[in-house]
Amino acid sequence: MQKILVCFDGSEWSKKALEQAITIAQKFSSSITVLSVVPKVCFLEMGIDCATVEGIFKTETEGNLNAAKKIMEERGVIGETLILEGTPSDVIVDYAKDNKIDLIVMGSKGKDATERTLFGSVTQKVAANATQSVLIVR
């Protein structure tokens, strides 16, 4: 097991997923890619400034990934962070396939009530569609 993909949104569940991935990486000398997916939020005309909304998402995501990178560095694990845009489940499955990921690790829930429902469905879709093993952390 050489490549581990961690889906990370800064929630407690994603932090637990990162911790599990680090433990596995240490045992197998694996590298970790921590991925955050920024969903396309402006697919409807809602009278909002899409660039501002997407900028807010990206800024928050960058902060979350910096925290994840710091955790990996402190634990002595080789890793990288990555932000991609699109439909989260599709992006995760496609990235894992295209980059020959051996294991996908993700939390069972997202960071708040609204996102919990969304992220939960993302977890289910990834588990159903990925060709790799998926570790769902509670």
Image (cartoon, grey):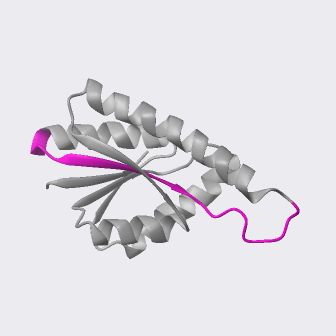
Q: Residue 137's x, y, as percent? A: 39, 47
Query: Would you place residue 134 above or below residue 77 in this image?
Result: below
Q: Residue at the spot x=69%, y=62% of the render? A: 41
Q: Residue 133's x, y, as percent? A: 27, 64
Q: Residue 9's x, y, as percent? A: 51, 45
Q: Residue at the spot x=34%, y=29% of the render? A: 71
Instruction: Please indicate whether residue 128 sits to the left or right of residue 78 in the image.
Output: right
Query: Would you place residue 112 above or below residue 129 in this image?
Result: above
Query: Would you place residue 31 above or below residue 131 in this image?
Result: above
Q: Residue at the spot x=45%, y=43% of the render? A: 14
Would you say residue 29 sits in the magenta stretch?
A: yes
Query: Would you place residue 73 above or below residue 16 in this image?
Result: above
Q: Which residues are magenta?
A: 27-47
Q: Quadrant of residue 102?
A: bottom left
Q: Residue at the spot x=84%, y=58% of the render? A: 48
- Asked if residue 47 shows in the view, the reply is yes
Would you say residue 131 sits in the magenta stretch?
A: no
Given residues 74 and 137, the one toward you in this image is 74
